[in-house]
Image (cartoon, rainbow, N blue to C red):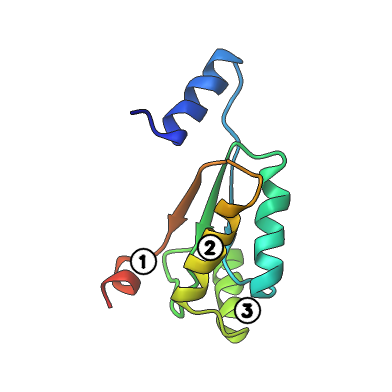
Amino acid sequence: MTSKILETFRKCQEEQRPVLLTYTVAGDSTKKQSLEIIKSIAKNADIIELGFPHNTPIADGEQIQESSHRALKNGIKLSHVFQIVKDFKKSKYSKPLILMGYFNLILQ
């Protein structure tokens, strides 16, 4: 069985073009708008990376840090991120989605 990510890389290689992988932080704006942002990105991106917001994203750049802080200020929780992903997977978009975050968030 081939993963959707590998299939995407192979398809782009056949088309002789780079893979467009985009990133956004879940919940930056609102939970509902976050889903709409992902759907909008999916229209043009090959792969979507969705970040878990974290209260001390010291390994990330300023834009991602600010996005994380806005998402947390808006009340986003880990369970909300998984619900956003679930809702996206139910939509008409079949793009691969990668979750990115700090291990300690999941461990806790």
Q: Residue at x 58, y 26 (%)?
A: 18
Helix, strand or loop under label 2: loop
Are the residues tagged 2 and 3 within 8 Å (C-beta)?
A: no
Classify mark 3: residues with Cα within 10 Å, few (<14), some (14-19) or many (20+).
Answer: some
Q: Nearer the viewer, mark 2 or mark 1?
A: 1
Q: Quadrant of the C terminus?
A: bottom left
Q: Which quarter of the picture shows residue 70?
A: bottom right
Residue corresponding to mark 1: 102
Helix, strand or loop under label 3: helix
Callout 3 amino acid: Arg
The image position of residue 65, as x and y in percent, is: 54, 71
Residue corresponding to mark 3: 70
Residue corresponding to mark 2: 61
- Mark identifier at residue 42: none
Classify mark 2: residues with Cα within 10 Å, few (<14), some (14-19) or many (20+).
Answer: few
Q: Residue at x 49, y 79 (%)?
A: 77
The image position of residue 94, as x and y in percent, is: 58, 41
If you read the primary sequence from the N terminus, does the residue marked by circle 2 or circle 1 appear first? 2
The image position of residue 107, as x and y in percent, is: 26, 72
Q: Distance between the Cα atoms at labels 3 and 1? A: 17 Å
Q: Nearer the viewer, mark 2 or mark 3?
A: 3
- In the image, taking residue 34 as reference, residue 105 lies left or right, namely left
Is 77 situated above or below 94?
A: below
Q: Distance between the Cα atoms at labels 2 and 3? A: 14 Å
The residue positioned farthest toward the left in the image shown = 107
Helix, strand or loop under label 1: loop
Callout 2 amino acid: Gly
The image position of residue 3, as x and y in percent, is: 40, 34
Q: Distance between the Cα atoms at labels 2 and 1? A: 14 Å
Q: Residue at x 60, y 36 (%)?
A: 46
If you read the primary sequence from the N terminus, does the residue marked by circle 2 or circle 3 appear first? 2
